[in-house]
Image (cartoon, grey):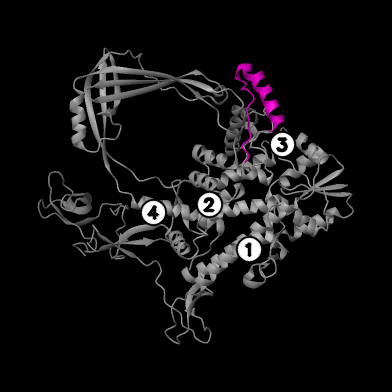
Amino acid sequence: MKVVIVESPNKCETIKKYLGNDYRVIATKGHVRDLATSGKAGLGVDCENGFKPTYTIIKSKRATVNEIKAAIKGAEEVILATDPDREGEAIAWHLSELLNLKPDNKRLEFHEITRDSITEAIRSPRTIDQNLVASQEARRIIDRIIGFRLSDVLQRKNNLRSGGRVQSATLKLIVDHEREIAKFKPEEYWTITARLTKDDREIEVPLYKYKDKEEKLPNKEMADEAIKETGNEVKIVKIDKTIKTINPKLPYTTSTLQQDAISRLGMSAARVSRVSQELYEGIRINGEHVGLITYIRTDSTYLSETYVNRARTYIKDRFGEEYVAPVKETSTKGKAFTQNAHEAIRPTSNKRTPSQVRQYLNNNQYRLYELIYNRALSFLMTSKKEESTSVIFASGEAKYKLTGNKTIYKGYEVLTGGSENKSLGFEPVEGDVFNVKSVTPKQNFTTPPPHYSEAKIIKLMEEKGIGRPSTYSSTISTLQNRTYVIKDKGAIIPTANGTKAIEFLEKKFKDIVDTEFTANMEEELDGVQEGEASRTATINKIYIPFMKEWNEAMKETLGNCPKCGAPLKRVKGRYGSFTGCSRYPDCDYKKKEEKNKPEYLDKKCPMCGKPLVKRTNKKGKSFVACSGFPECKYIEGKSLTPKKVEIIKKCPDCKDGNLVVRKGWNRAKKQMSYFLGCTNYPKCRHIEEYNPNVTKEDD
C-alpha cells in the first residue's frame, strides 16, 4: 500500500478514486508544525546562531500527526502531495522531517484535482524544493521576529494589541488615505442640462464646453453666462462615429478574482477565499467528488496549452468558428510564478457549464464559479465591436454633447450575455436645429475621495508588492480582528487605535510601514527561492536595522514612578495591561488611566449649549456627543425625539393645546435643533426653546 499525504480532507476521496486501491490518501488538515514560542522573547528562533529555528508540533495537530505516523507504518511508499505554493512546500518539508523520510522522497505537484492532472503528477514526481522551503522559512522567521517585537513595543508604549510586517504596511495605506479625506476641502462647480425639442422628440443634453474649455463651470456667474449664450436654438455642428474594439479581459488571478467578487457579488475577501477553496477542493456532482477550478493562489494569467486547445474546440462546437480568437499569448507570469503557481484560475472542464452544475452548488459557489468560468473561456473568444456616436450641439460659445453606442458584433459577449446599448433615440443629421425648451443649472460641490473598499485595498497590495496572494484576505481580516479598522457599509475605515498605531510606527519604525521596504523584502525572498541569495544573509539584512530601531524605541520610558522614581513600564495584569512601576512588586504604584479620553471640539451642543466632544466606542468607531452626558444625551447624527409624544406643559397661548418636543430648522443658529411646539399647530404657532435637562412642569 502506498500512502499519499494531502492538506485538505476534501481531496482524499477524489484523489484515491483516481489513483486506485493501491493507494491510501490522508490529510494533514493544514500546517502540522510551527515555530515554538520558547527561547529569547518567545521567538522560537536563535537570532545569535544563524537564526536557527525551533519547531514544535501544533497542539491541535498532535492527534493528526500520530494518525499519519500510524498510517505510514509498513507502507510501501510515502508520497507528499501538499498544495503547490510556498506554504505547501513548507508543509511537505515539515512532514518529511517528522516522518524521517529520505531527502529524495516523492513530492507531487498538481494544480487541479482531475484524473489527468493527478495521473500526470504520479507519472512525473519531483523532490522537495529546498530553495522554496528556505524562502518560506526565512519569511516565517522575519514575520515572527517583526510581529513579536512590534507587538511588544506597541503593547508596552501604546496599549495596542499587535503589529506585523504586512499588516502594518497595509494599515499605513488605509490611514494615509483617510488623512487625504480629512484634508479635503469641497469646491463649488456648476453643471447645465438643456432640454431640446424637435418635431415630437424631446431630449436632455448636458453642457460639454463653454468658451472651448471643458473645465467645470466654477461659479453661478459663469453658469448664467453659458445659459444666456445658449439662446433659444442649438444646431448639430458635428457628428462623430467610431468603431471600438473591446477585448476580453485576462483570466483571473487571486487578486483580480477577489476584487471582482467583492465589487460585483458583494462578497467579503474572506468569503471569496473560502468559497474558491471549496470549488478547488471539489463538489459532489452526480455522486462524484469533482474539483471545479484550478488552484486559487496565483499571480499568473497563463493558461496551459492543453486547456487552450480544449477550450478552442468547445467554443467552435458551441458558438461557431468565427467566435474562436486567434492564438494569443496568455502568459503574464508575475511574482507568483516563482511560487510554482503556473496557471490562472480557470475551470477544470469547459463542459461543466455554470447552468449544468448549478443544482449542486449553493448560491455563493454558483456565482463565483460563473465568474471564473466566463472569464477564462471568454478570454479565448473574439473581441466585441461597438459603434460609438457623439453629437455636438452648439449655440454661440456653448456646446452640448450627447453620446450613444450600439453593439455591431457581440464577440465574447455571446457567452456572458453582454451589456445594454445606450441609444441616442434618434438619427442625427448635421445642421439640424433643435429648439431649447429649458436650460437648468445645478450647483454642485466636489466630494472627497471615497473610503477604500476591500477590493481597492487588495488591488493596492498587489500593485505595491505587499504580501502575496495567500495573504491578501487574511491581512484585512487581521486588521479587523485587532480593531485597527472597521467595515462600514463596504468601506474599510481606520479606528482611533489604527491611526494611533501608525503614528507611532511612522516615528519609530519607518521601514516597517514603507511599502517599498515590504516589496523589496519580497524580492529578496524570491532571490532565496531562486537560489540566488542566502537565507541567513537575507534575514540579517532586515533583522539588523530593525533591531536597532526596536532597541531605541524600547529605551524610551513612560516617565518615572512618583513613589520611588524608577521608570514606568507597561505591565500585563490579570485584568489587562496597565502602566506601573518597573520595580513591582517592591513598588506597587499603578497609574490611573482615563479610558476613552474625549477630544473637545470647537462646536456647541444644539440641545444644551455645552461643548461637543469626540469619543470612541468599544468597537473603535468614533462619534460626536455632548460633553454634558449623562445629563444631556445628544449624539450627532442620532435623533433624540421621543418615540412617543411627551407632553411637557400646557400651551400658554391657546390654553387647550400642549407643548411637545419637535425638531426643525433654527434660522438664527442655522442648524437643525429641537424646540417645544404646540399640538394645535398650525392654528397655534407658539414655540419655545427646549432644554432636555429641565424637568416637566408637573414634576
Q: What residue type is labelled 4?
A: Arg
Image position, residue 245 (x, y; %): 50, 23
Q: Is mark 3 on a helix, strand or loop?
A: strand
Q: Is mark 1 on a helix, strand or loop?
A: helix
Rounded to the nearest whole Å, what is the CA distance between mark 2 and mark 3?
A: 31 Å
Proximity of marks 4 and 2: CB atoms separated by less than 8 Å: no
Residue at the disc numbered 3: 290
Proximity of marks 2 and 3: CB atoms separated by less than 8 Å: no
The mark closer to the camera, 3 or 4, is 4
Rounded to the nearest whole Å, what is the CA distance between mark 2 and mark 1?
A: 28 Å
**Does the stretch in magenta take in 154?**
no
Which disc number belongs to residue 476?
2
- Picture layout, residue 435 above or below residue 303: above
Could you classify mark 2 by the number of other residues whose Cα lies within 10 Å: few (under 14), some (14-19), or many (20 or more)?
many
Which disc number belongs to residue 635?
none
Which disc number belongs to residue 179?
4
Asked whether residue 29 is in view, the answer is no
- Picture layout, residue 128 above or below residue 693: above
Q: Give the extent of the magenta segment.
A: 304-333
| N-terminal-most mark, 2 or 1 | 2
| N-terminal-most mark, 4 or 2 | 4
